[in-house]
């Protein structure tokens, strides 16, 4: 299966300069071809494919000498990526391709010929760039994407084919359920707590943004006062990016640790399908939802479960998990949000914890789906095709930390 290994890069000043030139070149090329494709469509009503624009590279190199400073395969890759971006748009998987800006994240993609040499990554035309490897490279290096984030840090995302098969979800998990396996868990994601599990654990929602918010606000005010285009503005922009970066890192660390723990301790993991994108549109809830990052957490649960042949199952979000008594399955008509504990009028169970009850229902509903369909949700299957040469659909997973 394909895996992604992300490593930090520490280019020296000369390499930084060379990278900066290449980031600029591929960005220029992307924007040039995107514009050309738009214009061609307006003029002729026909589109241009990535392969068609690729043929123009040699001519462009004659007109713009500086394009030769960038590894030619990276330039060709830009055309292919643009083609993929349009395909994704036409198949409704993504928005219309956008022009790339100078101030955002910068990146360049090497389709091949990157090697690890000791503690360095050997990039064509850039040289041996010092890298921090937290784990060995296991398998064959396919593509390597070098990026620079807004706070000036460099990373390489190395796509690896490790030659291993994805383990099949274990049969005992599928037929055993909670009675035999005893290792199924339901997770209710909430705002009062980040996650509540069917075994009664409550994990607090760490509100880092509140903690860092004051800092962020000050830094953003400082940024707004800086003169446009000045060096100070750029410096200030990096400072703001650093605070954002800090928050994102803390959040992803928390998600990694909690998802690892849940996957280690359980065979079947059932989560409510939250349709996060729709919920974020509700502005009242938007801030705290974006902040807690359920989507990222579920993605981690999914791929971590998949790697170990465990089952990740999503339960429809319209399933009434809160309003159903887990003991007798009686459904109450209404259960306002402020009621945290309730008594079931049907079976007489007292002090039902609203959230733990919901988590138990999610677990049972997940197990029911697994038993009737016979399979779990195939975790994190990426359906985007990387090229149109008929390569098979692949599973890509981010491994870090
Ligand atoms: Zn009941």
Image: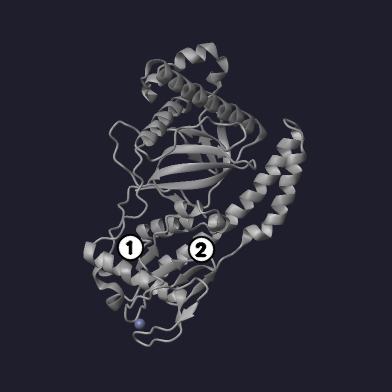
The circle on residue 264 is none
Res. 396 visible in picture:
yes
Q: Is mark 2 within 8 Å of ligand 1?
A: no
Crowdedness near tag 2: few (<14), some (14–19) or many (≥20) residues, C-alpha within 10 Å: few
- Where is 17 relative to 220, above or below? above
- Where is 89 relative to 293, above or below? above
Residue at x 26%, y 69% (from the top left corner): 172
Task: Give the residue at mark 1.
Answer: 311
Residue at x 49%, y 38% (from the top left corner): 145
Q: Looking at the picture, tell me which residue is in the foreground, 199 or 2.
A: 199
Q: Position of residue 49 (x, y in %)?
A: 37, 24
- Where is 79 relative to 340, above or below? above
Q: Earlier in the sequence, mark 1 or mark 2?
A: 2
Report if the CB atoms under discs 1 and 2 are less than 8 Å apart.
Answer: no
Q: Position of residue 139 (x, y in %)?
A: 39, 46
Give residue 237's quadrant in the image.
top right
Q: Position of residue 163 (x, y in %)?
A: 33, 47
Q: Looking at the picture, tell me which residue is in the foreground, 97 or 115.
A: 97
Position of residue 245 in the picture relative to residue 184 (left or right): right
How was the colour assigned to the protein in this rendering?
one colour
Task: Give the residue at mark 2.
Answer: 257
Residue at x 57%, y 59% (from the top left corner): 288
**Residue that lies at the very extreme toward the front in this rendered image:** 333
């Amino acid at each position: 299966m394909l895996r992604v290994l992300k490593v930090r890069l520490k280019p020296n000043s000369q390499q930084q300069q060379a990278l900066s030139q290449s980031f600029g070149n591929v960005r220029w090329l992307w924007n040039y071809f995107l514009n050309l494709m738009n214009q061609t469509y307006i003029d002729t009503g026909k589109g241009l494919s990535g392969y068609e624009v690729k043929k123009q590279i040699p001519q462009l190199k004659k007109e713009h000498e500086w394009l030769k400073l960038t590894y030619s395969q990276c330039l060709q890759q830009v055309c292919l990526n643009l083609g993929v971006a349009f395909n994704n748009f036409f198949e409704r998987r993504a928005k219309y391709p956008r022009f790339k800006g100078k101030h955002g994240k910068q990146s360049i993609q090497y389709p091949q010929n990157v090697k690890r040499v000791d503690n360095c990554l050997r990039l064509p035309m850039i040289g041996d760039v010092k890298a921090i490897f937290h784990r060995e490279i296991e398998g064959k290096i396919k593509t390597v994407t070098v990026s620079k984030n807004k706070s000036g840090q460099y990373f390489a995302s190395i796509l690896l084919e490790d030659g291993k098969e994805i383990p099949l979800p274990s049969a005992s998990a599928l037929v055993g359920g909670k009675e035999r396996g005893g290792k199924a868990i339901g997770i209710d994601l909430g705002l009062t707590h980040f996650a509540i599990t069917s075994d009664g654990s409550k994990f607090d929602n760490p509100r880092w943004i509140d903690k860092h918010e004051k800092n962020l606000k000050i830094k953003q005010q400082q940024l707004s006062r800086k003169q446009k285009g000045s060096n100070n503005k750029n410096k200030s922009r990096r400072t703001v990016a650093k605070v954002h970066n800090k928050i994102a890192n803390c959040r992803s660390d928390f998600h990694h640790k909690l998802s690892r723990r849940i996957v280690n301790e359980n065979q079947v993991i059932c989560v409510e399908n939250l349709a996060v994108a729709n919920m974020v549109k509700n502005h009242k809830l938007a801030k705290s939802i974006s902040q807690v990052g359920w989507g990222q957490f579920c993605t981690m649960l999914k791929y971590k479960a998949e790697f170990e042949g465990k089952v990740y199952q999503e339960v429809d979000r319209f399933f009434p998990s809160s309003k159903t008594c887990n003991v007798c399955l009686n459904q109450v008509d209404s259960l306002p949000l402020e009621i945290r504990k309730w008594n079931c009028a049907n079976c007489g169970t007292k002090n039902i914890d609203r959230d733990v009850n919901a988590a138990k229902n999610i677990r049972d509903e997940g197990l029911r789906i697994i038993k009737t369909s016979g399979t779990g949700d195939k975790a994190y299957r990426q359906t985007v095709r990387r090229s149109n040469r008929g390569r098979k659909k692949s599973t890509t997973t981010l491994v870090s930390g």
